């Protein structure tokens, strides 16, 4: 059994597909060849480009040349003085990239971490060398994320079919294209026309681990009747909701976000957030914030919530002690800068 070291613990390599494992092994080899005594996001990127995996093909389609990227590594980082001996440690950003890759695979509805999830993890490290290299060779990072998430969603659909069908039927299912499987999945539609306080109330009351205070739910329902709302519909039935609050022309807040429990980790929350962010960016909004339970509280449910927002690009700005913003609970303010859609 192999393990991949991450700050939240040891992420078992069994969740990595063979292609993802190969990427990490190649990253180690790249570090040794460059005489680096660490494995950073730049080495993970080089490892991705060494193989004919989905992430590499997306990069090739965007005119990324592996030799050019390697040359850029030499220019930006340089070559080490002597070959490293023994175990080569991962940098904090490389570890975090792999944690986010695992989060991305879960958000897409799959437990399998693939190369495209690893690349999404690298992209989430905005200050990392991997992102600087891609920007340096002219990659449109927004477009790259969109293409990677499209491939990740199709891969999740294949994973779900494989785990939902009997073993003797999987061979036939595996011959279908990912696109045909994606078309067969129930269509998810996002609407943003009218407030839906009824949907807000119904969803929140069925999620007591996150929304367990009746007075707070009543306030969410009351305020959502006057606020912009995005509703996720699956076969016409509401299964998720996001309510926005505008603080100014440039700043908005994800006031409340919820999805049916049975559909958690199926991409509904992400679809709602991304739909809202697209509209906000077009309207000139610069920053979006969200308030969630701070890490000083031991809730495992909210630890997953924070990981969800981090995977979408939100960064913790400040944690306020209990009773400062929320009675009895610490409040973490997370924020994201929206890219200009132009």
Image (tube, grey):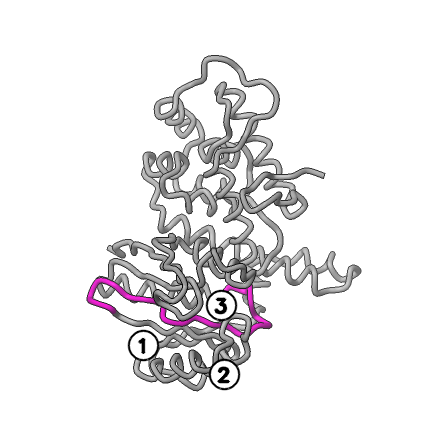
**Eye-nearest disc, 2 or 3:** 2
Q: Which residues are magenta?
A: 247-268
Distance from the alpha carbon under mark 1 to that under mark 3: 18 Å
According to the picture, the residue beneath numbered tag 2 turns out to be 202
Secondary structure under tag 3 reads: helix
* Residue 313 marker: none
Q: Are marks 1 and 3 in contact (CB under 8 Å)?
A: no
**Crowding near the residue tagged with mark 3, few <14, some 14–19, many ≥20 C-alpha atoms within 10 Å:** many
Q: Position of residue 245 (x, y in %)?
A: 30, 72
Residue drawn 59% across and 39% down?
A: 5
Query: So how many labels did they put on this image?
Result: 3
| Quadrant, the C terminus | bottom left
Rendering quarter of residue 260: bottom right
Secondary structure under tag 1 reads: loop
Distance from the alpha carbon under mark 2 to that under mark 1: 18 Å
174 is higher (above) or lower (below) than 258 = above
* Residue 228 marker: 1
Q: Earlier in the sequence, mark 1 or mark 3?
A: 1
Q: Position of residue 118 (x, y in %)?
A: 51, 44
Q: Residue furthest bottom?
A: 198
Distance from the alpha carbon under mark 2 to that under mark 3: 16 Å
Q: Residue furthest right?
A: 168
According to the picture, the residue beneath numbered tag 3 turns out to be 268
Q: Earlier in the sequence, mark 2 or mark 3?
A: 2
Rendering quarter of residue 247: bottom left
**Crowding near the residue tagged with mark 2, few <14, some 14–19, many ≥20 C-alpha atoms within 10 Å:** some
């Amino acid at each position: 059994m192999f393990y991949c070291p991450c700050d939240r613990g040891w992420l078992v390599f069994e969740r990595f597909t063979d292609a993802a494992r190969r990427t990490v092994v190649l990253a180690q080899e790249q570090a040794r060849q460059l005489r680096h005594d660490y494995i950073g996001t730049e080495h993970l990127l080089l490892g991705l480009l060494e193989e004919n995996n989905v992430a590499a093909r997306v990069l090739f389609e965007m005119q990324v040349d592996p030799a050019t990227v390697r040359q850029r590594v030499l220019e930006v980082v340089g070559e080490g003085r002597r070959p490293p001996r023994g175990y080569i440690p991962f940098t904090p950003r490389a570890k975090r990239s792999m944690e986010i890759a695992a989060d991305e695979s879960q958000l897409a509805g799959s437990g399998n971490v693939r190369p495209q999830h690893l690349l999404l993890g690298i992209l989430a490290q905005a200050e990392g060398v991997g992102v600087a290299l891609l920007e340096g060779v002219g990659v449109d990072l927004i477009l790259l994320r969109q293409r990677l998430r499209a491939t990740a969603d199709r891969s999740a659909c294949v994973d779900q079919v494989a785990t939902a069908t009997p073993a003797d039927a999987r061979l036939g299912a595996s011959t279908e294209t990912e696109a045909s499987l994606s078309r067969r999945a129930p269509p998810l539609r996002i609407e943003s026309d009218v407030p839906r306080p009824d949907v807000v109330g119904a969803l929140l009351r069925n999620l007591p681990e996150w929304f367990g205070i009746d007075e707070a739910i009543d306030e969410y329902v009351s305020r959502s009747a006057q606020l912009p709302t995005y509703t996720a519909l699956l076969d016409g039935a509401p299964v998720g909701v996001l309510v926005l609050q505008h603080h100014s022309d440039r700043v908005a807040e994800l006031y409340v976000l919820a999805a049916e429990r049975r559909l958690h980790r199926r991409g509904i929350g992400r679809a709602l957030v991304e739909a809202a962010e697209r509209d906000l960016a077009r309207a000139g909004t610069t920053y979006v914030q969200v308030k969630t339970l701070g890490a000083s509280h031991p809730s495992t449910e909210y630890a997953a919530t924070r990981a969800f927002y981090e995977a979408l690009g939100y960064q913790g700005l400040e944690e306020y002690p209990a009773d400062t913003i929320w009675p009895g609970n610490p409040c973490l303010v997370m924020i994201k800068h929206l890219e200009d859609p132009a």
